[in-house]
Each structure stands twice: as structure tokens, then as C-alpha cells.
């Protein structure tokens, strides 16, 4: 199980995302404006080898007329990910306990994507975002499990939805909170069933 440290990160995850997010093709805001981000939810998965930190963070941008919720899967590494494309790196940060962390967009990290696929197959358990060794029962998987080797797709812009996903997909459903305090749930990731 991964350990969640109560320490500092400089720059913070939200500071790194403020510069990175507007450069992404799926960013729904004005790319020339600076996002106003707040952490609004998410969960963690454990790397069986204990080397990569895995977090699925929901960041809500309130800079536009309506808030937008983004799902950013992040992989935290002690060194650079070999052969990763330049756009995969969100940035580096100094962790108060672990030192320099290379933070990657998780869709480019094979460990994160492997654990997401394991979650969809029922072979990995979601963990609370800010607590060590604590399962998160609010994160649920719906639908027929995909076969091994089936790729997962992450929903980058989140929309509130019913817990029941489309019958043609296996889905990870989790929650986040809007700036006004309203708690909602939506589909974070999907994969085709067997």
C-alpha cells in the first residue's frame, strides 16, 4: 500500500496544472486565460511494485462563466520516465520527504494505465486520495469486466451522470464537489467489455 505523506510540494500540483492544462487539446477553457483551479475530488491506486505514485485528481476550473471539472491522472516518479513524449511531463516538484518527483500525465505512464485496467477488471482496489492504506468505497466499477490487454479511456472533462454507465462499456464511477458544495458523480474511465 502507498503511503500518503503530510508534507509540502514545491511547486504544488495545482500550480503545475495551472500552466500545463491550457496547453492540452481537450482543455475546454480559454487557452489564453489563466485557469483558477481547486482540488475537487479523486482517488489513488497502488503500484504493486511500490515505485510509482498513482493519483486520479479532479481539478475544477472556475475561471470561465461555468466551472469545468477536469480529470487528471498523475503518475509520480523518482526519476524521468524513459522514452516518454515531451508532452507527457506535467512538471517536476520538490516533495518534502521524497525529494524531486517527476509528475507525468498518467495516460502516458504504463504503470498507471496498467493499474487502471486492473481496477476495471476487479483486480485492484481504489484508495482514498489523502489517506494511506484506506480503501475508497465511493469509487465503483460498473459493467462487464474487460479482458486483459483491453485499453482504458480516461474522461478528461467530467460531467455529472447516473451511476449506471452505458451497457456497452465497463466504467469507473466516482465523485467530486463543485465550488458551491454540490457533490456529484460521473464516469472517470471506460473500457470495452469482454
Image (cartoon, rainbow, N blue to C red):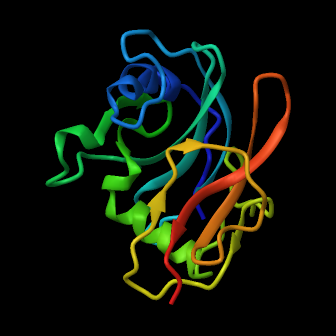
Left/right placement of residue 31 relative to residue 53 reads: left
Q: Quadrant of residue 64?
A: top right
Left/right placement of residue 188 relative to residue 98 reads: right
Q: Is residue 89 above or below residue 171?
A: above
Foreground pick, 191 / 74: 191
Foreground pick, 158 / 134: 158
Residue 127 seen in render: no
> Which residue occupies 85% across, 28% down?
181
Q: Is residue 30 above or below residue 115?
A: above
Q: How many marks?
A: 0
Residue 153 seen in render: yes
Position of residue 118 measured from the top left corner of the image (x, y, whole percent): 52, 76
Q: Quadrant of residue 178?
A: top right
> Which residue occupies 73% across, 52% down?
161
Foreground pick, 163 / 104: 163
Left/right placement of residue 169 relative to residue 89 reads: right
Position of residue 18 measured from the top left corner of the image (x, y, whole percent): 45, 20
> Which residue occupies 76% across, 50% down?
185
Position of residue 75 measured from the top left corner of the image (x, y, whole percent): 42, 49
Question: Residue pushed farthest top?
Answer: 33
Position of residue 26 measured from the top left corner of the image (x, y, whole percent): 40, 37
Foreground pick, 98 / 138: 138
- Quarter of the figure that contains the N terminus: bottom right
> Which residue occupies 63% across, 14% down?
65
Left/right placement of residue 161 relative to residue 171 reads: right
Amino acid at each position: 500500500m502507498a503511503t500518503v505523506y503530510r508534507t509540502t510540494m514545491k511547486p504544488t500540483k495545482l500550480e503545475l496544472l495551472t500552466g500545463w492544462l491550457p496547453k492540452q487539446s481537450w482543455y475546454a477553457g480559454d487557452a489564453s486565460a489563466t485557469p483558477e483551479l481547486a482540488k475537487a475530488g479523486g482517488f489513488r491506486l497502488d503500484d504493486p511494485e511500490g515505485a510509482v505514485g498513482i493519483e486520479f485528481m479532479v481539478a475544477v476550473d472556475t475561471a470561465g462563466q461555468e466551472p469545468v471539472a477536469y480529470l487528471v491522472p498523475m503518475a509520480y516518479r523518482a526519476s524521468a520516465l524513459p522514452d516518454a513524449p515531451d508532452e507527457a511531463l506535467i512538471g517536476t516538484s520538490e516533495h518534502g520527504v521524497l525529494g524531486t518527483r517527476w509528475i507525468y500525465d498518467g495516460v502516458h505512464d504504463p504503470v498507471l494505465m496498467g493499474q487502471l485496467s486492473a481496477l476495471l477488471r476487479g483486480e485492484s482496489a481504489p484508495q482514498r486520495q489523502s489517506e494511506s492504506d484506506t480503501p475508497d468505497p465511493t469509487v465503483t466499477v460498473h459493467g462487464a469486466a474487460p479482458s486483459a490487454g483491453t485499453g482504458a479511456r480516461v474522461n478528461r472533462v467530467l460531467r455529472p451522470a447516473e451511476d449506471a454507465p452505458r451497457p456497452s462499456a465497463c466504467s469507473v464511477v466516482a465523485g467530486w464537489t463543485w465550488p458551491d458544495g454540490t457533490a456529484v458523480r460521473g464516469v472517470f474511465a471506460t473500457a470495452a467489455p469482454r
